[in-house]
Amino acid sequence: MHFVIMCQDKPGQAETRAAHREAHFAHLDHYADYIIEAGPLMAEDGSHSVGSLLIVNFEDRSSAEKFIQADPFHKAGIFEAVLLRPYKKILPRK
C-alpha cells in the first residue's frame, strides 16, 4: 500500500538536522526498496529545508509507522508534525 509521509520541522532545526543527516540517509538506504520518492521540503526562498516528503510502499500502516519512528530525524526530535496518509497514484498513467 502506498503512503505519503509529510514531516514538518520544528523551527531552528538546521544544526540538529545536519548532525543527523548521514544517519538519516543510512536509514533511507536501508529501506530503499520501499521508497518511491523522497526529499526535503524547502523554505519559500529555497535557502534551507523545513521538513521532508516521502512516498513509500509498505504492506500496511503499521510498517510505515515503524519506518517513521526509526528515522534518526524523528528520534532526534526534529519534527513538529508528521502526517501519514494512504496514497493512490493516478498520474502519470504508466
Image (cartoon, rainbow, N blue to C red):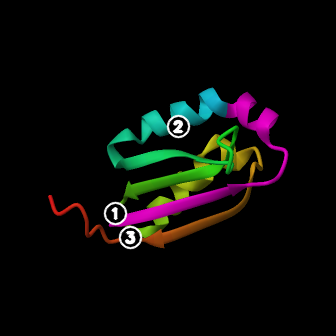
Q: Categorize mark 2 by other alpha carbons within 10 Å: few (<14), some (14-19), many (20+).
A: some
- Real-space CA distance between mark 2 and mark 3, rounded to the nearest whole angstrom: 22 Å
Question: Which residue does the numbered mark 1 point to in the structure image?
Answer: 59
Q: Is residue 4 above or below residue 34?
A: below
Q: Earlier in the sequence, mark 1 or mark 2?
A: 2
Q: Is residue 6 above or below residue 15?
A: below
Residue 61, horizontal then vertical, whole percent: 45, 69
- Real-space CA distance between mark 3 and mark 1, rounded to the nearest whole angstrom: 13 Å
Residue 87's disc is: 3
Image point 70% across, 38% down: which residue? 47
Image point 22% across, 60% down: which residue? 92
Magenta segment, which residues?
A: 1-20
Identify the amino acid type marked 3.
Tyr
Say if the magenta span includes residue 29: no
Identify the amino acid type marked 2.
His
Quarter of the image with the C terminus is: bottom left
Question: Which residue does the numbered mark 2 point to in the structure image?
Answer: 27
- Real-space CA distance between mark 1 and mark 2, rounded to the nearest whole angstrom: 18 Å
Helix, strand or loop at disc 1?
Answer: loop
Q: Earlier in the sequence, mark 2 or mark 3?
A: 2
Helix, strand or loop at disc 2?
Answer: helix
Say if the magenta span includes residue 15: yes
Pick the residue in front: 90 or 54.
Answer: 90
Identify the amino acid type marked 1.
Glu
Tag 1–tag 2 contact (CB < 8 Å): no
Number of marks drawn: 3
Image point 40% across, 48% down: which residue? 37
66 left or right of 50 in image: left
